[in-house]
Image (spheres, rainbow, N blue to C red):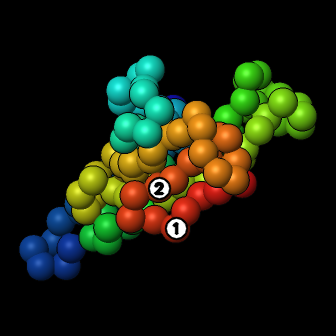
Amino acid sequence: VDEMTFTYLDQAPLESLTAQTTIVASWVGSIRLFPNPTVSGQPLMVTVTDPDLNSDPVVLLTAEVSYSVGPVDCAANPTDPDCLLKGTITVTQTAVGSDSFTGVVYPYTTGEPDPCQLRCIGLPTAEG
């Protein structure tokens, strides 16, 4: 762990002031789905928690979350032909300065034109 020290020499009254901070390489984020498992056509809440995403503490921010649908682990095997649908959804910060970002999707097991279409509430349709 690295620490950084800042020193300021105040002229009136003559005094040396210091402040320190710890520098970390990065935070490990997390993702949560609720409810899990989910029912076709019902809302699925996607929550990402990652302090690294909170890049501006005075602005409501967004982030992109990738998704894939398939009978295999598409994140571990991204080129597998059984990964039926891939895309992203936008998650929005829950409050200014927060480390949490949420979005809602409606996953479907049947539908047209793709049997695994995924629709987003309040966002452009994320279809393959």
Residue at the bottom extreme?
Answer: 12
Tell me: 2 left or right of 7.
Answer: right
Q: What residue type is labelled 2?
A: Cys
98 and 71: which one is in front?
Answer: 71
Q: State yes or no: discs 1 and 2 in contact (Cβ < 8 Å).
A: yes
- Measure how far apart labels 1 and 2 are at the Cα level: 7 Å
74 up-or-down from 16: above or below: above
Q: Residues within 10 Å of mark 1 (few under 14, many from 20)?
A: few
Residue bearing the label numbered 1 = 124
Secondary structure category for the residue under label 1 = loop
Residue 18 circle label? none
* Left or right, residue 125 beside residue 50: right
Residue found at x 40% / y 58% = 121
* Residue positioned 47% across, 33% down in the render: 40
**Which quadrant, please, contains the C terminus?**
bottom right
Residue type marked 1: Pro
Disc 2 marks which residue? 120
Q: Position of residue 45 (x, y in %)?
A: 37, 40
Where residue 93 sits in the image (x, y, percent)?
Answer: 34, 56
Circle 2: element type: strand
